[in-house]
Amino acid sequence: MPKGSNVWVVHRPDGTWGVQREGGKRPSNVTSTQREANEIARQIAQNNQVDRITQGTDGRIVSHDSFGNDPNPPKDTEH
């Protein structure tokens, strides 16, 4: 069972990237690149056994990685 809320990587209006918990109002981290934000989000998601969800600049989900204990995980076609 997951220990917390999923972690999202979102593009911000000022052109930076934010890392925030699902349902959170403010990002816990703000970076200048999506790559940096994804790395921070990956570490948080792994430590908390939750999902990392990355949105593109248009708000669409471009990546979804699960770090939880899924008893029947789907085959990963992304990596």
Image (spheres, rainbow, N blue to C red):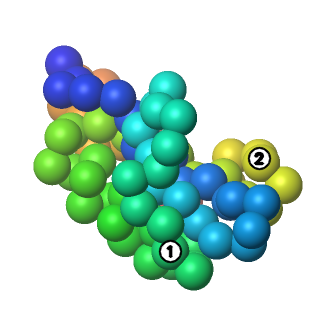
Q: Disc 1 vs disc 2: which is toward the camera?
A: 1
* Residue 15 in the image, given as x and y percentages of width and height: 73, 72
Q: Is residue 1 above or below residue 4?
A: above
State the separation of the CA atoms marked 1 and 2: 19 Å
Residue 31 image label: 1
The amino acid pointed to by label 2 is Arg
* Residue 76 in the image, given as x and y percentages of width and height: 46, 50
* Residue position marked by numbered label 2 in the rendering: 60
* Residue 49 in the image, given as x and y percentages of width and height: 21, 39
Kind of element beneath mark 1: strand
* Residue 65 in the image, given as x and y percentages of width and height: 43, 48
Furthest residue to the top?
1
52 or 33, which is in the foreground?
33
The amino acid pointed to by label 1 is Thr
18 or 73, which is in the foreground?
18
Question: For this view, does 5 lie left or right of residue 59?
Answer: left
Q: Residue at x 47, y 33 (%)?
A: 24
